[in-house]
Amino acid sequence: MQLKEDYTSEIIKLNPDYEGDVKAVLVASNKNRGNRKSVLYLHGYIDYFFHPHLGEKFNQNGFDFFALDLRKHGRSLMRHQHPNYCKDLREYFEEISITIKKIKQKGNPVFLLAHSTGGLTASYYMNYGKERDSINGLILNSPFLDFNQSPLSKSISLFVASLISKMSTYAKIEGALSSAYAESIHKDYFGEWDFNLEWKPIKGFPTYFIWVLAIAKAQTEMKTSDIQVPILLMHSSGSKKIKKYSKEAMTNDIVLNIEDIKRVGEKLGDKVERLEIKNAQHDIFLSPKAVRDIGFNKMFSWLESTDFKK
């Protein structure tokens, strides 16, 4: 499948926020039938939907496929907005709820699939979102459930973020994230994927201190998570911290620590199944073909074998 030819986009107008007009964009596969179970994909930070092969796999396995570019990301980013900015992850609940209601009108089961920061947002939503009872299952692809820092470094970082954000709500830090991961997946560097470098720059966007606090708040609230539906927790078999690209970026999660994913993820609810995908990258489904195919096979096996009755 091709992104431009095989998908349609629909603008979802949202309530204005502290920056003015707001929108989200719902992307749908042209091969959806409208009479079968559906999956809604939520992307991560400095990210958007550019994964036509993902929708193709779901269509081939009996699902309608939808993806949401959350406000201030990708197709939803407007000129007057700060990219990827938010003060609270609950800001995203509006477009998630609208989209779930839209998809649920068909009356068939709906599943959430979410990657990285999207995995944190989806988990948060499944605890507090208005339409959480309309979701039958949750699939987390390397969710951002804790900062990849030591407890001391994390404590210092959050103290500094709190202090600085009180002086300026748009205070930011440049170059907080390594470009190694983006280089490992983009076709012009070491990967095989093409994506819009204005929406997902290789060097990333500035990281706003208030965004860091929003992440920390959601992660703290996840300590009492009680998600009622079955959860598939997927992650790589290894994690490495690297500042510059190396071959290790192709076989490890170089963004998050898999031990954090295991520790927090297994407590998100009472029905969590954890899957370790050997040699996967941070986004399992952007890993080299042999690796991502294993991830796909195991995910669809879980979807076929799990009891999703409420």
Image (cartoon, rainbow, N blue to C red):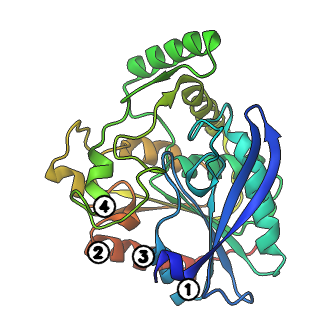
Few, some or many residues within 10 Å of mark 2 (<14, 14–19, 20+):
few
Q: What's the distance in space between the residues labelled 4 and 1, CA to CA?
A: 23 Å
Q: Is residue 189 left or right of residue 58?
A: left
Q: Position of residue 288 (x, y in %)?
A: 27, 69
Along the polypeptide, which appears first: circle 4 or circle 1? 1
Which residue appears at 18% of the width and 51% of the height? 248
Q: Residue at x 64, y 53 (%)?
A: 76
Which dot, 4 or 1, sits closer to the camera?
1
Give the Cα separation between the discs numbered 3 and 1: 13 Å
Residue farthest toward the front in the current orientation of the protein:
79
Question: What numbered label is drawn on residue 59?
Answer: 1
Q: Is residue 251 visible?
A: no
Which numbered disc flags the more N-terminal residue, 2 or 3? 2
Tell us which disc is closer to us: 3 or 1: 1
Dot 2 lies on which element?
helix
The amino acid sitting under disc 3 is Phe
- Labels 2 & 4 near each other (Cβ < 8 A): no
Q: Identify the element where label 4 is drawn.
A: loop
Is mark 4 in CB contact (under 8 Å) with mark 1?
Answer: no
Asked if disc 3 and disc 1 are in contact, CB closer than 8 Å, the reply is no
Q: Looking at the picture, which amino acid does disc 1 mark?
A: Asn
Q: Earlier in the sequence, mark 2 or mark 4?
A: 4
Task: Write down the residue under mark 2.
Answer: 289
Q: Which mark is residue 280?
A: 4
Q: Which residue is mark 3?
A: 296
